Image: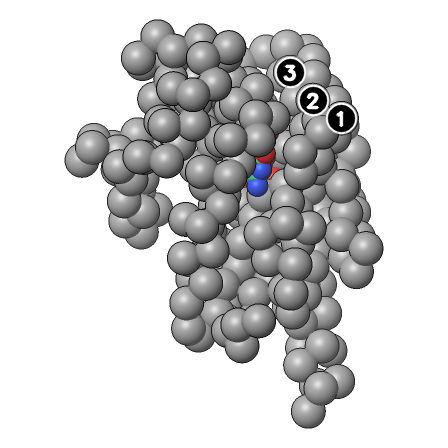
Amino acid sequence: PSAIPVITIDGPTASGKGTVACRVAAVLGWHVLDSGALYRLTALTCIKRGIGIHQVGQIADAAAYLDVVFKGDEILMHGQDVTAAIRQEAVGEFASRVAALEPVRAALLARQREFRQAPGLVADGRDMGTVVFPDAHLKVFLIASARARAERRYKQLIEKGFSANIDEISRDLEARDARDSQRLHAPLTPAQDALRLDSSALDVDQTVNQVLDWYKDRTQAVQ
Ligand code: CDP
Ligand code: CDP
C-alpha cells in the first residue's frame, strides 16, 4: 500500500462531502478528489451524445476517455468550463444510473487512484473507503437528515442561479439515495472501519474540525 495518506469522506447526496473535503484538504495542504464529478462528467457526455442508459459499452468508453482537467475550482472538459453544467440535478440523476454499471466503475478506478499524490489526498464519494482507497488512514461516513440535505441542495441551486423546488429535490434525493444504496456494485455503505459523522445540526466549520480532530488522533496514535 502507498504511504501517501488518504482521508476518505463517503455519504449520501448533499451531506456536505464535497464542501468538507475541500476545506479539510485546504487546511492540510493536500490534494482533493471529487469522485462524483467523474460520474457526472460521464453522464454529461452521454446526455450530449444522446447515449442511452442501455448502451453500456458506449457509456464505459465515455468514462474511459473523459478529457477532463481539474483546474482549481473549475472543471474543464475538452477545454470547456462545465463546472456549473454538471451540478444540474438531471446530470446527478443520470450519473447515479451510469454509476450502477460495473464497466463504468472499472473504467474510472485507476484514474481515481492517480489522485493519490504527496503530501496527501482527501477523496469524497460513495465508495472511497470501501473500494478505491481501502487502506485510507481515516474513513469518514458523513450523513445528515433528509430534510437538512434537501435544504442544503435547494440553497446551493438557487445560489448558482438554477430554479429549484424543495419537494422535487427531496424526491430526487430519496430516489438517488435508494439507487446508490441498493445497487450491486460498490453500493453506498460505510466501510467497516469508517467513523460516522452526523452533520444535521453542525455547521461546516464544526464538521471540518471533527474530521481534523479524528485525523490528528490517528496520526498521534501511531507516533
Ligand atoms: O458533496 P455533497 O453532495 O455531499 O454536498 P455538498 O455539495 O458539499 O453540499 C453541501 C452543502 O451544505 C454546502 O452548500 C454546504 O455549505 C452546506 N453544509 C455543509 O456542507 N455542512 C454542514 N455541516 C452544513 C451545511
Ligand atoms: O453531490 P452529490 O453527493 O449529489 O453527488 P456526487 O457525489 O456528485 O455523485 C453523483 C452520483 O455519482 C451519485 O449519485 C452516485 O451514484 C455516483 N457516485 C458513485 O457511484 N461513486 C462515487 N464514488 C461518487 C459518485
Q: Amino acid at mark 2?
A: Arg
Residue 182 circle label: 1
Q: Which sits earlier in the primary sequence, circle 3 or circle 2?
A: 3
The response on whether ligand 2 sits within 8 Å of label 2 is: yes
Name the secondary structure under disc 3.
Answer: helix
Give the residue at the far bottom of this rendering.
Answer: 223
Relative to residue 102, is residue 192 depicted above or below? below
Seen at 53% across and 72% down, the residue is 2
Name the secondary structure under disc 1.
Answer: helix
Total marks drawn? Answer: 3
Seen at 30% across and 30% down, the residue is 82
Q: Which sits earlier in the primary sequence, circle 1 or circle 3?
A: 3
Instruction: Name the side, left or right, on which 83 lies relative to 99.
Output: left
Q: Nearer the viewer, mark 1 or mark 3?
A: 1
Q: Which residue is mark 2?
A: 179
- Camera sees residue 40: yes
- The quarter of the rendered structure image containing the C terminus is bottom right
Q: Which residue is mark 3?
A: 172
**What's the distance in space between the residues labelled 1 and 3, CA to CA?**
15 Å
Residue 47 at what x, y percent from top left? 38, 13
Residue 40 at what x, y percent from top left? 45, 29
Relative to residue 124, is residue 65 depicted above or below? above
Q: Amino acid at mark 1?
A: Gln
Q: Nearer the viewer, residue 74 or 131?
A: 131
- The quarter of the rendered structure image containing the N terminus is bottom right
Seen at 45% across and 38% down, the residue is 107
Instruction: Name the side, left or right, on which 56 lies relative to 208.
Output: left
Name the secondary structure under disc 2.
Answer: helix
**What's the distance in space between the residues labelled 1 and 2, CA to CA?**
5 Å
